[in-house]
Amino acid sequence: MKTLNCAIVAVLKAIAVASLCGMSLLTVVDATGRYLFNHPIIGSVELVELMVIAVIFSSIPLMTRARGHITVDGFSHLFSARAVALQDRFGALLATVVSGFLAWVTWGKAASTAGYGDMTAMLGIPLAPFVYFMAALLALDAVYHAANILRPVAATGSDTP
């Protein structure tokens, strides 16, 4: 199980890094072409939008797995360690339900997007694979939240794997 998790994390990191680098390179080349040669890259905005999807949705489960999401613990010092742990588990349970619901709704949207054959306007890239990608990573996020229900929290409040 640990090997599978390491492989998933490595793939998600590679997707995020490749997409960020691709966005940067595409933006530089597009701006150079636009202002120096009066010839921008056609569809560059669409490509950047699709890469933003890859960055955001690959990063969400990575942050959940590493417990890197922002938390506000202004009153946690008033409660016992047991109460704080219970609160953390309740938050993970709630986040599991929300992520699972979002994955389910997004999967339905992906199916309708595929059914309609939606594509980007300039390049004609089918959108359904990207929406299925979003749904799958939201489902993975729900799984990681569920795992966080069972995983103990480190004393600092975060525990990176």
Image (cartoon, rainbow, N blue to C red):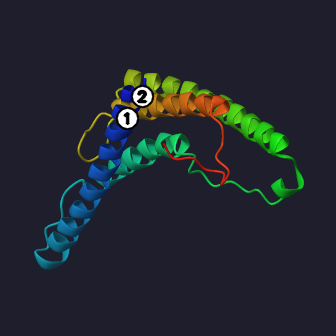
Res 89 quadrant in image: top right
Residue 76 vertical placement versus 57 (above, below): below
Along the viewing direction, whichever of 38 and 63 lies nearer the viewer: 63
Amino acid type, residue under disc 1 in the picture: Cys
Along the viewing direction, whichever of 80 and 24 lies nearer the viewer: 80
- Binning the other alpha carbons within 10 Å of mark 1 as few (below 14), some (14 to 19) or many (20 upward) gives few
> Which residue sits at x=33%, y=40%?
10
Residue 132: % across, % down: 41, 28
Would residue 78 be found to the left or right of residue 99 on screen?
A: right
| Residue 97 visible at all | yes
Residue 44: % across, % down: 25, 56
Q: Which residue is mark 1?
A: 6
Along the viewing direction, whichever of 94 and 110 lies nearer the viewer: 94
CA gap between label 1 and label 2 equals: 6 Å
Would residue 103 be found to the left or right of residue 81 on screen?
A: left
Amino acid type, residue under disc 2 in the picture: Lys
Residue extending farthest to the left is: 37
- The answer to whether the residue labelled 1 contacts the one labelled 2, judged by CB atoms less than 8 Å apart, is yes
Residue 101: % across, % down: 62, 28
Say the numbered circle drawn on residue 2: 2
Mark 2 element type: helix
Residue 30: % across, % down: 20, 66
Res 24 quadrant in image: bottom left
> Which residue sits at x=59%, y=51%?
69
Mark 1 element type: helix
- Binning the other alpha carbons within 10 Å of mark 2 as few (below 14), some (14 to 19) or many (20 upward) gives few
Residue 156 vertical placement versus 31 (above, below): above
